[in-house]
Image (spheres, helix red, strand yellow):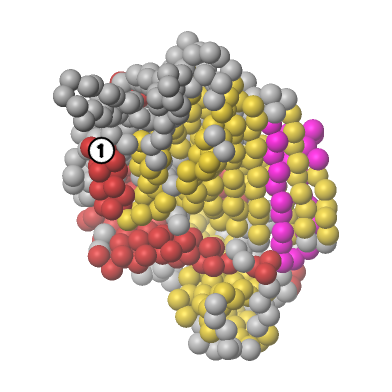
Amino acid sequence: MLASIQIGAASPVAEYLKLSTDVNNGYAITTVEEKLNNPTDTAVEDQFSFLIPEEAFISGFSLIIDGKEYRADVLPKKEASEKFESAASGGRTAGLLETKDENLFAYALSFEPGQSIIVKLTYEQALKKTLGEYELVQFMESSRPVANLSVTVNVNAANQLIRLEAPAFPEAEVEYLSSNRGQVRYEADSLPASELRVVFETANPPLNGNMLFYENEGQGYMMHIFSPSEENLGTSAMSKEIIFVLDKSGSMQGYKLEQVKDAFGNIIEDLPPGDYFNIIFFDSTIQSYSGTLMEANSEQKAGAFDFVNSLEANGGTNINEALLTALGMFNPESGRVPIIVFLTDGEPTEGVVSPYAIRQNIKDANTAHVAIFSIAFGIEDENNYSFLRAMSLENYGTVERFSPDDNASEEIGGFYKTISTPLVTDMTFSYSGGVTELVNTGEKNLFAGSDAIVLGKYSSEIGKIQADVSASTRTGPRIFSKEFTVSPKGVNAFIPRLWAYTTIESLLDRIEVEGETEPLVSAITDLALEFEFVTPYTSLFVEVPEFSSPGADGGEETVPEMPVLATEEEMAAPLSNQIQPSSDSRYESDIETEESQVYGGLVEDKVAKEGAEEGADESTEKSTPGFGVLFTFSGFLGVAFLLQRS
């Protein structure tokens, strides 16, 4: 989503907006380029913001002014802050971009009359394969008219490209370039009313997977794609034991609870024969449909449906007792896949309320290795979300965030479908040939229509790599083995970046679970600097050299005085619905706070030169003509503020 907020009476005009994405085997690199012109005869100011995917890392930002590109550098967080402090105190134009908990990238620019500025942003993300398909979302909403919009999405896959489309965008052109390459193009003379969704599907790899290779200066990188289907496994999905643990505390009253009843009523109805299930609602106390897991036959499903619809919201939130009650119902010897779907809209308020104590209690009680998939339903407090995320990660699951809007029931049902058909469980991967620094994008369970991707490093001297995957299926334990011949290709140049991206994500997950330690922080920082990713421990810093333009009098250099831009309050107000700015000082020396603060913006100063002779007052105003910039990052950026020094 591209949003624009006008700060002055006049506003720059967007000459064009270009979005270009290259997707290689699910790894997407997107570049956003916008050219902005000031056609008026007065200086104008404007502020803009982009929404980027929550899971994306910013990897590049630059501004092209008068034909010259100013590119931001990724630096350690403290060093970037120090450089910005130095620029600020020296009256130089600079910007600092740091992480925040929202997926907002924002900046502000000041334009001279007739000036053009090109803004370029690059971000990278790994797309997840769910229910057999990948989805890429391009946000394209704006309050600023754009007369020239172009979007290009190039898709390249190791396996055959079966389907490529842009649903709800019939104007988009889809072209298949080869058996495994395709392109989506969309052009318009205005911005569409919604985001562009590109969906594609590829053929499954062989039973033992595919392995791709890339080498650079003697260092090899491998990518093992493991995604067996029911057909090539020769068996159906495994039966499961599943317990739905659902919040019905007072804060769930009304529309929220109605959405939950609707979603889980449909989920219960769709449970297949052979599954065992139960439903636990909780507030201050616990209410279970049954004291034990029940077979998913028509009689039990009808009774559960009535149970769900009979309950009302009230009371507090006893998360600890609810989850411990559910964990006590699983039979580790059943041979079925154990799963908990846990939904809550708030923090624990009854019984054990410490999130750390709850996490430890759940971890100790989870002797059946139950995968806990949490649904954060309308949770805005990041501490509560982090608690759910950590608890899920250390119990073989994940967390998803949903808003209690009109589509909540459908979205929750869609999420459930992605975890409803376990094909392979208890996966372990091993490789010969000295493969090191392995990282896995998947969990211990592989669901139908998903994949597990393992990345690692190898020496370029190795000619073959043996892959062994030990796992359980419906027919029992199996080992999937294959020897791959190392064959590096230039088209696989994305693999090192995907390896770094996935490794950083894995390390951030460990910090969520284990806490922030020096080895983990150092590992993330080193990788982020090497591959130029903005993370909670690295920042983007840009400084624009000051220069002058010739004046009209005798060659004397003059620059029109920069307009005074917005105050903190004025900058924060337009974005208040998207992100709340920090109330802390913007230029404190200690930025290593628990929640990263955001600094940024414009530094403009009038620099005076005193003449050599007494009484001769010769002054020159120095600045980058018509240029002021404010940057922010969240989710990997947060709102940054403007600094005007005089």
Residue positioned 41% across, 35% down in the render: 547
**Is 291 above or below relative to 17?**
below
Residue 406 rendering spot, x and y as whole percentages: 55, 28
**Is 428 above or below relative to 72?**
below
Disc 1 packing (10 Å; few <14; some 14–19; many ≥20): some
Q: Is residue 450 on the magenta stretch? A: no
Residue 137 rendering spot, x and y as whole percentages: 62, 42
**Quick one: quadrant of the N terminus?**
top right
- Name the residue at the front extreme: 613
Residue 196 rendering spot, x and y as whole percentages: 66, 37
Query: What amino acid is at disc 1?
Result: Gly
Q: Which residues are magenta?
A: 149-173
Residue positioned 25% across, 42% down in the render: 85
**Is 479 above or below relative to 312?**
below
Which sits in the foreground, 138 or 76? 76
Residue 569, by quadrant, is top left
Which sits in the foreground, 18 or 635? 18
**Quick one: quadrant of the C terminus?**
top left
Q: Which residue is mark 1?
A: 90
- Name the residue at the left extreme: 614
Which sits in the foreground, 569 or 310? 569
Residue positioned 58% across, 40% down in the render: 32
Which sits in the foreground, 494 or 119? 119
Residue 399 rendering spot, x and y as whole percentages: 44, 50
